[in-house]
Amino acid sequence: MTTVEATMEAMEGVEDTGAGLAKGSNFDIIKRLLGFMRPFNTIMICSLIARTLKFIGQAAVLGIAAASVGIYIEAYEPGVVNWDIIWSQVRWIALAGTIVGFSSYIENYTGHYVAFKILAAFRDRFYFAMLPLAPAKTAKLQSGEAVSRVMTDCERIEPFYAHTIAPAVVAIIVPIVILSWCYTIEPSFVYVLAPFYLGTTFILPWLVSKLGGDGVDYRRQLGEVNAFVADSIQGVRDTVAFGYEKQRAKQLYAIGETMTEGQEKLYGADANQRALAEIFITVGILVSAWWGTELALAGKIHPLIDLPAMIAVSVVGFYLSVGLANNYTDFRIAIYAARRLFGMMDQEPAVEDSATVKPEVTSASVTFKDVVFEYDADDKAWSRQKKVFDGFSVHIEPGQHVALVGPSGTGKSTVVNLLLRQWDVQSGEILVGGNKLQSFPLEDLQSQFAVVSQRSFIFNDTIRENIRMGKYDSTDEEIMQAAREAGLEEFIKSLPDGLETQCGERGSKISGGQRQRVAIARAVLKNAPIVLLDEATSSLDVETELGVTRALKKLSDGRTTLMIAHRLSTVVDSDEILVMLEGKIAERGTHSELMARGGWYAKMFEMQQDEVDVTLVAEDE
C-alpha cells in the first residue's frame, strides 16, 4: 500500500469520527441562522436601509454627473461660463455623495457589529450545546476537527451575516428602484435592462455551483487537514523520538494535495464566474447603449441628458447583481460550515438531565446495584463489543476510604465516569446518599464530587484562576487556604507573581507535582462530600508522590473517598481495598487481609515492592 493510499484510508477514519452534517434543506439552515439575528433585527434593518441609500446615492452621483454634461451643453452660450448650472449640478452631486459617505459608514459599522455580536452568541450557544455531549460524544471528534468547528467554521459563518443578507436584499431593491426610474423616462428601456439584471443575480450563482465553486469539498478537506495537523503537532515528541518525521510529512503532503484539488476547483470556478460576470456587464451595457441610441434617434429620450444618465445609473445595478454573485461562494461555504456546527449541536445529549429538584441527601454513601454497562453500545462504529460491567455491585459507607485496584481495562475508571454521569448504565442502579443518580439535576450531582485525576486539566491561566474552578466566587484568602492544605503555599510564595503566575498551556510552566497540587487545591476549595481520586499520583516520581499523597490524605479526611490506583503502596491505609478483575470484585478487604490471602493483590504488591527496592538501590549507588 502506498503512502497516499494509507493516508486516504486514515482520512476516511477521520471523517467517521465527527458528528454528521445537520439535516434539512439550505432554506432550513438559513432560517436557523436568521434565528440568531432576532435580537439584532433593528440594527440589521438600519444596516439594510443604509446600504440601500448608499447604492441609490451612488447611482444618483453617476446619473447626475452624466446628465450634467448634457445639461451644460444644451444651455451652452459661446464665450459664457454658465456657473449657475455648474454649481447647481455640483450641489446635487455633493448632496448625493454625502448621503453615500454617511450611509456607507452606517452600513459598514452596523453590519459588522451585528455579525460579530451574532458570532459571539453563536460560539456561546455552540459551547453550551457541547457540554451535555462531553465526554461521551465529543471524544469521537479529533481535536483538530473540534477546533476547526468551533473557530474556523464560526468565522466562516460571518460572511452570511456581513456579506450575504444585506447584499441579497439590496441587490433586489436597488435594481427595482433603478428600473422604476428608467420606466418613468422610457418603459421599453426596462424590458431591455431587466433580463441582464436577472441573469447576473440568478444565473451567475447557478453557474458557479455547476462549475464546482460551492466550496463544500474544499471545506470538508480543510477540516481533515486541520485534524491531521493538530494530531501531528500533539504527537511531535513521539514522532521525533521514533524518527518518523519524514513519513508523517509525506502523509501531510498527501492530505494537503487533496485540499489543493478542492482549492483549484473552488478558485477556478470563482475565476470563471468573475470572467462571466464581466461578459454579462459588458454585453448588458452595450445592449442598453444600443437600445438607448435607438430611442434617442427616435426622439423618445433626450440624447445628451437621458441617454447617458440611464446608462450610468444602470451600471450600478449591474455591479450590485454581480457583487451578489461574487459572494455566492462565501455564502455556500457559510451554509456548509453552519451544517457542520448544527450537526454537532443537534446530537442527543449523552445523558438526559430531566430532574428539576435536588433530592434530599442525608449521607455521602455510594452504591452500585447490578450495574450493566457497555461503552457506545448504540454506536456500531465505536462499540467495543464487550460489556465493562455485567451485574456489578458495590457499596461504600459514608466517610469510608475505599481503594479500587486491578489491571488496566477492568473498569476502574468507568466507575468514576458512571458516578459523574458522563455515561449512563444500560441497566441497574447507581445511588448517592440513597438517591438514584437520575434524580439529581446534573449540576447538583456534580456538586457532590471533588475529582482529582491523573490528567487533571490545568488551563492556560493563572494559578489563582485554576484553583478558583473549585469555587468560582472564592476569595484570595480561601484560595490560599486551599493551597495550604494542598501543600502549595510555599511554592506560591516563592514565585515573583504569586497567585498571578501563569501556568502555561496544560500547565507547562509548572512541574507535574505542582500541577497535581493545583488540582488538589481545586478539589479542597470545592469542599464536596465525596472525593474521587483517579490515578492521582501515577505519573509522579516516588518522592513527589509522597508529598502529593499527604495532600490527598488531607483532602480525603472526613469524606467518602473512592481511590483508583495502580501503585498499591498508595492504598495500604484504605479502609477497604477492592480488587477488580474483568469488571467484577475478585478480592476485597484491608491491606493485611489481602496480603494474608495471597491472591492477585498480594502478588502484585510484592512485585511492586521489589521494583521500588531495585530503584532505591540503583539511586543509592
Image (spheres, rainbow, N blue to C red):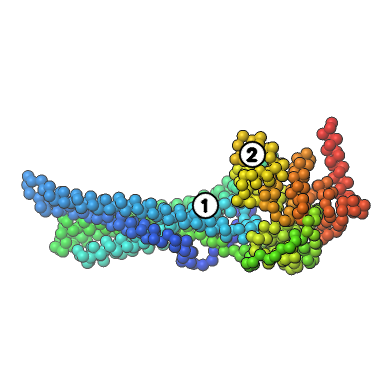
Q: Residues within 10 Å of mark 2 (few under 14, many from 20)?
A: some
Q: Residue furthest front?
A: 477
Q: Residue furthest top?
A: 621
Q: Position of residue 531 (x, y in %)?
A: 73, 54
Residue 152, numbered label: 1
Q: Nearer the viewer, residue 604 or 487?
A: 487
**Residue 47 appears in view:** yes
- Badge 1 element: helix
Name the N-terminal-most of marks 1 and 2.
Answer: 1
Marks 1 and 2, how far apart at CA: 28 Å
Q: Relative to 503, is 97 above or below?
A: below
389 left or right of 273 in image = right
Q: Position of residue 26 (x, y in %)?
A: 47, 65
Badge 1 amino acid: Thr
Give me the residue at 37% from left, 63% from top.
202
Badge 2 amino acid: Lys
Q: Nearer the viewer, residue 218 or 606?
A: 606
- Badge 2 element: loop
* Residue where numbered disc 2 is placed: 509
Q: Quadrant of the C terminus?
A: top right
Give me the residue at 15% from left, 59% from top.
302
Q: Nearer the viewer, residue 255 or 113?
A: 113
Give the quadrant of residue 186.
Answer: bottom left
Give the quadrant of residue 550.
Answer: top right
Give me the residue at 85% from left, 35% from top.
617
Q: Position of residue 217 (x, y in %)?
A: 52, 56
Q: Relative to 91, is 358 above or below?
A: below
**Residue 321 appears in view:** no
